[in-house]
Amino acid sequence: MPKYVIEREVPGAGKLTAEQLKAISQTSCGVLSNLGPEIQWVHSYVTADKIYCIYNAPNEEMILEHAKQGGLPANSISKVSAIIDPVTAE
């Protein structure tokens, strides 16, 4: 299944409390449950003003639907073409 990186512009994201992050996560998981097993949230990285999410999904449209239903921005969606890490250098 294709993997995507979603960039979400969330001003002040890095200052969100653990409870606020939990609420965002719960909303996302609720929408994922409704959309079915074809779309999966892998994990996210929270920075000062953005959240970068890694998702497995059959297409970009499903990611956009997740964002719409969850009330989350999806400012940029990029399909991953390859994954590299230190082992790639060996």
Image (cartoon, rainbow, N blue to C red):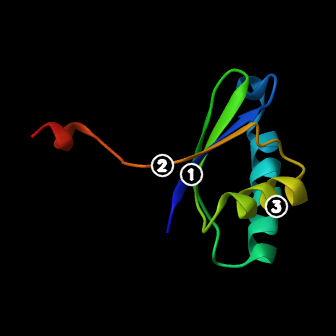
Q: Looking at the image, which residue is at 82% across and 41% down?
A: 73
Query: How would you rate the neighbour count of disc 1 (Cα within 10 Å): few for under 14, some for 14-19, many for 20 or more?
Result: many
Q: Amino acid at mark 3?
A: Glu
Which residue corresponds to the image point at 19% horizontal and 42% vertical from the top-left?
Answer: 88
Q: Residues within 10 Å of mark 3 (few under 14, many from 20)?
A: some
Contact, mark 1 vs mark 2 (Cβ under 8 Å): yes
Rendered residue at 74%/68% (across/down): 32
Q: Which residue is mark 3?
A: 65
Q: Amino acid at mark 2?
A: Val
Q: In the rendered image of this protein, does residue 56 appear above or below residue 86?
A: below
- Reading the image, the residue beneath label 1 is 4
Quadrant assignment, res 39: bottom right
Circle nearer the N terminus (1, 3): 1
| SS under mark 3 | helix
User: Which residue is identified by label 2?
Assistant: 80
Q: Is residue 74 left or right of residue 79?
A: right
* First along the sequence among labels 1 and 2: 1
Q: Earlier in the sequence, mark 2 or mark 3?
A: 3
Q: Residue lying at the far left in this picture: please name it.
A: 90
Distance from label 2 to label 3 (Cα)? 19 Å
